Amino acid sequence: MSKINCLLLALGCLLLVLTGCGNEAKSETAGQGAQQEKVTHVTLATITASDLKETFTLPGTLEAWEDLTLAAEIAGPVRWIGPEEGQRLTQGQAVLRIDPETLDAQMARNQAEYDRQKQHVERRQRLVEKKLVSVQEYDDAVQAFKVAEANLRLSRVALQKSTLKSPVAGVLDALLVDRGEYVSVGDPVAQVVQVDRLKVLVDVPEKDIPYLEVGDQVQVTQASIDGRQGETRRGTIIHLAYRADPLTRTYRAKIEVGNQAMTLRPGMIVRVEAVRRTLEDVVAIPLYALVDHEGMKVVFVEEQGLAHMQPVTAGAVIGKQVIIREG
């Protein structure tokens, strides 16, 4: 019996020891939890009423301001080609010449005939005044002189047309003939594009067309292909279509954009950003600051170092901001 009592006493002491150790472990764990309490990092922003612009962005395509295909105005072999493909041209610069030698000879012949008929008319005029020739002979001489004058004028025009000139300042994009090649009237011989300024073609949806007018300023940004931010420049709306495209139900807009540095090329894709409307004296906050809580929209407002939850009524989302209508 004494042995049983000693065993029960020993078990009781062991239980007390184990209980004490467990309490110490819980106390230590609680202390560590208090030290590792989660801290929420916040950023404060001062919100004031201000004017806010609502914009929209549409894709657009660049086109040359002038895209011209030059054609031969006379028939003959191409004797001379001046600039090379890709070379910049000034307005009126010669591109090629078509058989100028033959035309120059024809003009010299017509010039000689013109001079001869002019002298013939002058002699007939003096003779008819002296009544040595009939008036009919004088009239025939005048008629022959007019024909010679017309032929000389035609030869001068043909000689001028033998030299094909660029009607605009631009770039010789393509030569379609080679030197020595025979061309007929109307054959395309060269392509010239004017790219010191470009046109942006944009298809505007029906919901946005009321916000645009001819003369409005827009932002034109080159599309990013390799991750780099494209250059942004200002453009001006120069035309808005009155009739919608029957397939897309959009309205074509044309925008003029400068390209003096020649960094933009026809065919490139750009983004056009335009102002839809300007909201005056509104309160807007970052979109991420608006929180859903138990079916309500709330924000956290700092007062004396503490964050207080404030229910609000949100309005339109503009870019990365949301307008607060109430609260």
Image (cartoon, rainbow, N blue to C red):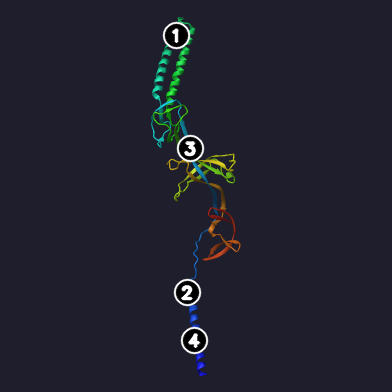
Is label 3 in a helix, a strand or a loop? Answer: strand
| Cβ–Cβ under 8 Å for marks 1 and 2 | no
Q: Name which residue lies at 48% across and 13% down.
A: 143
Q: Earlier in the sequence, mark 4 or mark 3?
A: 4
Point out the tag, 1 or 3, that comes first from the N-terminus. 3
Q: Residues within 10 Å of mark 2 (few under 14, many from 20)?
A: few
The kind of residue tagged 3 is: Trp
Confirm or deny contact between disc 2 and disc 3 (CB under 8 A).
no
Instruction: Tell me how far mark 1 sits from mark 2, CA to CA.
Output: 130 Å
Name above or below for residue 221 compared with residue 49: above
Q: Residues within 10 Å of mark 1 (few under 14, many from 20)?
A: many
- According to the picture, the residue beneath numbered tag 3 turns out to be 65
Dots 2 and 4: beta carbons under 8 Å? no
Q: Amino acid at mark 4?
A: Leu
| Residue that label 2 marks | 32
Q: Which quadrant would residue 130 be assigned to in this image?
A: top left
Q: Label 4, secondary structure: give it.
A: helix
Determine which residue is flagged by label 1: 124
Q: How many marks?
A: 4
Work out whether residue 211 or residue 265 is closer to the camera in this orientation and state it: 265
Check if mark 1's residue and mark 3's residue have beta carbons within 8 Å.
no
Q: Earlier in the sequence, mark 2 or mark 3?
A: 2
Residue 304 in view in this figure: no
Q: Nearer the viewer, mark 1 or mark 4?
A: 4
Which disc, if any, is residue 276? none
Label 1 is placed on what type of residue? Arg
Instruction: Kindly identify the residue that appears in the image at 45 percent across and 17 percent down.
Output: 149
Residue holding disc 4? 14
Q: Is residue 33 visible?
A: yes
